[in-house]
Image (cartoon, rainbow, N blue to C red):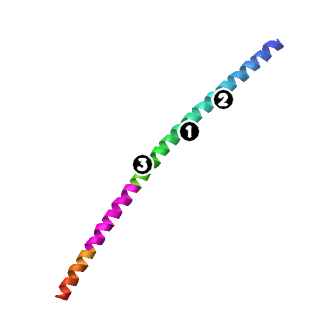
Amino acid sequence: MIKVEVDQRLQSDKDTKLLVQNLLKNIMNEVASLKDSQDSTILKLLKDVKDQAQDSAERAHFLSRYIDEEIAKNAEKSTK
């Protein structure tokens, strides 16, 4: 009778251990999946920011050239 109780408790402990191990594996898989998703989102955002920065720099450069050209044109008109 006592042996049966001990065996049942041991089996219950083993089942609990396996359940906890499986739960931990599932949690770790979900965490890894979320991390991968976040990493890809961050990479996309970084690329978007870099593209926007480059676009803004190009626009600022062209605006600066345009302003310089207009100033030069006005300076020519003023000297004539």
Quarter of the image with the N terminus is top right
Residue linked to disc 2: 20
- At 35% from the left edge and 63% from the top edge, which residue is drawn? 56
Q: Is residue 70 above or below residue 32?
A: below
Q: Name which of mark 1 and mark 3 comes first in the sequence.
A: 1
Please identify, in this view, whether the residue under mark 1 or under mark 3 is nearer the observer: 3
Labelled pair 1, 3 in contact (Cβ < 8 Å) = no
**Which image quadrant for residue 80?**
bottom left
Q: Name which of mark 1 and mark 2 comes first in the sequence.
A: 2
Q: What are the residue bounds of the magenta stretch? A: 50-66
- At 40% from the left edge and 56% from the top edge, which residue is drawn? 50
Q: Is residue 53 above or below residue 4?
A: below
SS assignment at label 3 = helix
Residue linked to disc 1: 31
19 or 32: nearer the viewer: 32
Residue 75 relative to residue 38: left or right: left
59 falls in the magenta region = yes
SS assignment at label 2 = helix
Which residue type carries mark 2? Answer: Val
Distance from label 1 to label 2 (Cα)? 16 Å
**Labelled disc at residue 41:** none
Q: Name which of mark 3 and mark 2 comes first in the sequence.
A: 2
